[in-house]
Amino acid sequence: MMLRPATMGSPPRDLPGHVNAGPVFTCSLEHKALPMWSQLFVGPTDDARINAMPIVSGVWRGGATIFMRAVLKAYGATDRLVWVVDSFEGLPHPNATKYPADDRDKHHTYSLLRVDVEQVKENFKRYGLLDEQVRFLKGWFRDTLPSLAKQRWAVVRLDGDMYESTMDGLVNLYPNLSVGGYLIVDDYGAIPSCRQAVEDYRRAQGIDDPIQAIDWTGVFWRRSA
Ligand SMILES: C[S@@+](CC[C@H](N)C(=O)[O-])C[C@H]1O[C@@H](n2cnc3c(N)ncnc32)[C@H](O)[C@@H]1O
């Protein structure tokens, strides 16, 4: 793929949970995750593909979703969409009453994480990848994700940083992740509250598919049942 380095790269993070990417990066994508994403769309036969869609919940500048659209295009998959879901105005104020793990969370103060939807569309256009196979869903996850309850997912990538945002993604998207599909969590290693949301959800749902490290913070597991 010709997306490196402008759309890809793991930018240095010099504050807990804070992306210090500067203007050059479009995303904080985990390079090692790329082959497995592609695998979902390019199995050796049609039967080996998962006939479902990728979604990113927490897209920032859009790089992960741009890459997903590029994979679909590269392999001629015209039968599925890429979902780009974000507030496009940064993270929510913490609701510590409902989510104590988010108490004193500061992500809503990080202006770098506020990227307007028009800017994300511009980033897609830079690669010639803004078209009818890309769907934008704007708003807080708690309000928007329930509207996707009838969709099926091949890859769910969660990058909402906070406990609330991670849990909203899991509760609303994991039930419709295809068996064989991948659940990716970007901030599992970097942000304790994100990790706690993942562990709470897995315990509550009895999920024991092994968690595998992608890099120093990102993890994934493949849904087996
Ligand atoms: C760290 S950035 C995502 C980075 C991106 N996935 C990447 O690979 O570069 C977190 C994003 O999640 C969004 N976000 C976090 N919590 C949210 C929520 N509860 N509702 C809507 N958007 C949220 C923020 O607006 C921000 O764009």
Image (cartoon, helix red, strand yellow):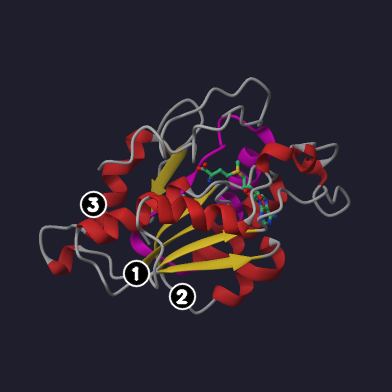
Q: Nearer the viewer, residue 131 or 80?
A: 131
Q: Position of residue 21 (x, y in %)?
A: 57, 29
Asked whether, in this view, residue 93 is left or right of residue 142, the answer is right
Stretch in magenta: 176-204
- Give the CA separation, mark 3 to mark 2: 20 Å
Q: Secondary structure at mark 1?
A: loop
Mark toward the start of the polypeptide (3 vs 2): 3
Circle 2: residue type = Gln
Above or below 213: residue 168: below
Mark toward the start of the polypeptide (1 vs 3): 3
Q: Nearer the viewer, residue 202 or 122?
A: 122
Residue 25, label in figure: none
Q: Which residue is mark 2?
A: 151
Q: Which residue is mark 1?
A: 52
Label pair 1/2, CB-CB below 8 angstroms: yes
Q: Position of residue 217 (x, y in %)?
A: 51, 30
Above or below 7: residue 120: below
Above or below 19: residue 26: below
Asked whether, in this view, residue 70 is left or right of residue 160, the answer is left
- Give the CA separation, mark 1 to mark 3: 13 Å
Quadrant, the N terminus? top left
Q: Which residue is mark 3?
A: 39
